[in-house]
Amino acid sequence: MNVNSLRRWGAAIFAMAGVNLAMASDPLNVTGDKFRQLDELLPTPNAYRTASGAPGHAYWQQQADYDIQVSLDDDKQLITASETVTYTNNSPDTLRYLWLQLDQNRFKPDSMGNLATPVDLESIAPDTIPFGVFRRQVVADEFPGGYQISRVADSKGRELAHTIVDTGMRIDLPQPLKSGEQVRFQIDWSYKVIEQKALGGRSGYEYFERDDNYLYEIAQWFPRMAAYNDVSGWQNKPFLGRGEFALEFGNYRVAINVPADHVVAATGVLQNPEEVLTREQRARLKKARTAQKPVMIITKEEALKNEKSRSKKRKTWIFEAENVRDFSWASSRKFLWDAQGYKKGGTDTLAMSFYPEEGMPLWDKYSTETIIHTMDVYNRYSFDYPYPVSISVNGPVGGMEYPMITFNGPRPEIDDEDRSKRTYSRTTKYGLISVIIHEVGHNYFPMIVNSDERQWTWMDEGLNTFLQFLAEQEWEEKYPSRRGDARKIVDYMKSDNQVPIMTNSESILQFGNNAYGKPATALNILRESIMGRELFDFAFREYAQRWKFKRPMPADFFRTMEDASGMDLDWFWRGWFYTTDHVDISLDQVRHYTVGTKNPDIEGPWKREQHNSEPETITAIENRARKLPRIVDAKPELADFYNKHDEFDVSNADRNSYRDMLAGLEDWERDMLSVESNVYVLDFSNIGGLVMPLFLRLEYEDGTVEDLRIPAEIWAKNSRKTSKMLVRDKNKILKSVILDPHWETADVNVENNYYPRRIIKSRLELFKEEKRRNLMKDWDTELKEKG
């Protein structure tokens, strides 16, 4: 074998090794071919889920119905309850056991979620930790949390074998549950309600020291059926505190026994108002259904009177809810209650707000109005809100959603000396409006479009944050939205500490940016800049309509958006959802051409002009300044023909060649030589890795401006570098080009988007160095009295 053969074999071996290494480091090829189809990443379509993204003809889902009796002990902050669960197996499978979620077990000191919670002592400064974070750990290690389950029995009262695994419980069935069959069983339990401000979480109580009262927001409070589906079987991953819930739809009847002076808000419709409300309150509630503004059902005066009472009697509030995936409630003697009906299209509901007196004047002004605004906007982009009530409750939980009821936190600041003096910051006002929009919006995603939150946080948080952004923009001009606009996600996109959107909920880094901000921004870019509003809105609404009251997976969303719009978006899903690439596209240079005529009498002078326009060499300048003597000047006889003619002079031979060339051209080819247009070639490089369309603003010397939008497919042949040719009229002389002039693409470096480059303007901030501690001076400082 000769040397050249060895070289060829060596090159081939290294090439194969390179391919294998690339496949090993990137098995899903998410960083290679940016336009490779997603078929290899998405599950194969079947009878349950079609290639179009719609539910298949054999789609199924389970049903879980609940009949619950619960009692709240306001002295001990204790829940005691009993439930009867009716579980219907609509799957084609035979089930030998059932899985339930025991979310309150997350608050056991030895729970997986507690023990697996890491600590970061470097996030702010070395060896430091916020008070609240430290308090949470101290309390978590001591709090007697979790369920005390006293009975698990079948419908005839016979004990059922069961095994508790952290936040899950497996019930072993005495007889296999075949397809189409039902099983009914009972569970009795109790648990201590957590203090939400101490332990965090999505529910708990708040204590008001001034009037010695409690406000309870109760959620994830009963053993709930885990989801069983065609993709993952039982969704029985442990609840570690972040990845939320995967649940089954069903019907609920819940009887809530509380102190007689408490007011209860809950999922569903109140069945016994005549037993728990006064005649006047019932009349107000009836009036609210047709009112044009919120009506007080329980007034401030009534709430303050309740605060002072300590009834020894008890009342039972009974609620029923149909076709919901969960049930939550709130209870306190501090609640004011306002309500207003909303009837439009297929929606006929009662928007209601429950809040303590401490929430005024913010909550009575904005809460119920925001509920109605949210439904008005979300209905247009998805489907008509189907439930009979929509509730917003102010309590300790900053923001959390359950069917028909949401928990929302912001309140005004109250002066310690004069409680009538109340103010709120801009952040508090818009924070309240935004969190209500967001949490009420969750009634659409995932409370109705029932995605698996335990696995894919972005499918509800990201989609909902996107719609939240649309609703905020319809509240007022220049609404200070935190997420949605492309420029708001730039810092995150260029950060190193991130993972793809398509990451399990418990493994996400920078949770808010990853699961909320980035997918919301991606969808807004799709809508505004790639698909257009009409195509996007039709496709998004189709997804919502297809999957309401069903359980979609990521592939169903991706496929539906493409199916309904007729656009191939695989490159977009691949880049935005499967990678951590960012947008940094550079406009490297702009080249200006005019068409060469090939006529030597035109091209010769043109070339001479171009040559003469070049700057003189520094050597020539110095030689002339020093009057450098030259031999040809001293001896003229050394000059010849070439001293009178340069390479740009034209000969008859050149002219004859030109004529011969013209004779060999077709008519249309000769026409091309006479085109007088300006030709511009724009060169781009993809620095960040994420391919995107090229949005250009072309400014011409005559003062006119042209906007040009080039689709992302221009990167299909080469995702690192590409060029675009523009042919313009001879009078259109290009002055400058701006790439992404409206900052639509989340480009992390807009300075390389200008040609020619612009001067970067900023501010130089000065600061004064702090004086070092002077112990001798401080030693005689008087001690302040305790305030």
Image: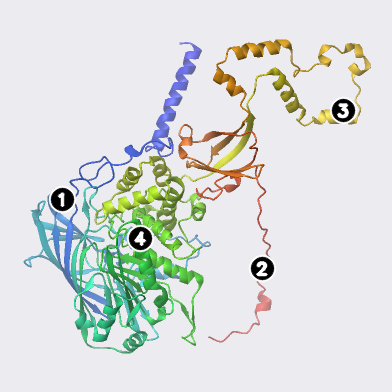
In the rendered view, would you say 364 is above or below 748?
below
Asked whether, in this view, residue 63 is left or right of residue 718, the answer is left
For the N terminus, the image quarter is top left
Q: Earlier in the sequence, mark 4 or mark 2?
A: 4
The type of residue carrying mark 4 is Tyr
Residue at image mark 4: 378
Going from N to C along the chain, the mark reached first, 3 or 4, is 4
- Amino acid type, residue under disc 2 in the picture: Glu
Q: Position of residue 618 (x, y in %)?
A: 81, 31
SS state under label 2: loop
Residue that mark 3 sits on: 623
Q: Which residue is mark 1?
A: 91
Q: Is residue 197 visible?
A: no
Give how far across and how far down residue 583 sits, in percent: 50, 45
Q: CA distance from mark 3 to mark 4?
A: 78 Å
Residue density around tag 4, few if under 14, some if 14–19, many if 20 or more, within 10 Å: many
Give whichever of discs 3 and 1 has the lower sequence position.
1
Alpha-carbon span between mark 2 and mark 1: 69 Å
